[in-house]
Amino acid sequence: NVGNVLQTLGRSAEALVAHEGALAIQRELNDRAGEGLTLTNVGNVHYAWSDFPRAQSSYEGALALLEEAGDRFHAANTLGNLGNVRWALGDYAGALTLHGRSLEMKRSVGNRAGQALTLTNLGNAYTSLGDYPKAIAHLQRARQRVAGGEQGDEFDHRARSFTWRQSARRHRAG
C-alpha cells in the first residue's frame, strides 16, 4: 500500500497520513482484517519514531481486530511487534511472553520464515537477560528454519556475532 512505500522511502509522516486515510475507508467498509493490518502499519511508523506507547496502542488495537477477523497469520506477526515494543522498553520478560505466543501461532499456521524471525527475537531477548545459552539455542533454532547451505551459515554467523556483541556491551556497561 502507499503508506508502506512512503515508509520505505523514509517519508514516515506522509506514510502515517496515508495509513490514516486507509483506516477511514476500511472502517466505512467494516473491513476488520484490513483495519487490523493498517493499524499494524500505523504502529510500525510509531515504532520507527521510537514512540513506543503509541506503537503499543496501535498494535494492541490491530491484534484485537485481526483475532476478531480470524486472521491468525497477521495476528502472529502483530504479537511479535508487541514483543519488540516490550523489548525496546526493557521489559524482556514481557517480550519473551509475547514472542512465545507469536511463535506458537506462527507454528499453527505453518509460517516457517516467521518462526525464524520470532526465534531470533527470542534469542535477542535472552541475550538482553544475559542468558546466553538460551539465546544461542534460539538463534540456532532460527537458523534451522532458514534455508540451509551458505545462507544458513551466514545467518548463524550473524546470530552468534549479535549475541557476542550484546554480551560485550552488557559487560562494558555493567
Image (cartoon, helix red, strand yellow):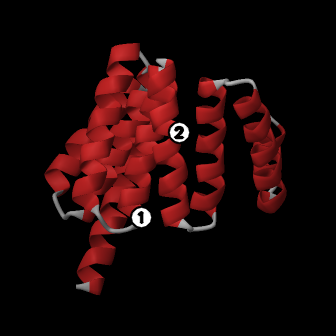
Residue 155 spot, x, y in % from top left: 44, 40
Mark linked to residue 62: 2
Mark linked to residue 133: none
Q: Does dot 1 land on a helix, a strand or a loop?
A: helix
Q: Does dot 2 land on a helix, a strand or a loop?
A: helix
Identify which residue, 82 or 10, lies in the foreground.
82
Left or right: 92 with respect to 145?
left
Left or right: 83 with respect to 37?
left
Identify which residue, 123 or 95, lies in the foreground.
95
Residue 44 spot, x, y in % from top left: 61, 51
Can you tell which quarter of the image residue 98 is in?
top left
Q: In the image, which is nearer the foreground, mark 2 or mark 1?
A: 2
Residue 47 spot, x, y in % from top left: 57, 59
**Nearest to N terminus: mark 2 or mark 1:** 2
Can you tell which quarter of the image residue 39 is in?
top right
Q: Residue at x 46, y 30 (%)?
A: 75
Residue, disc 1? 88
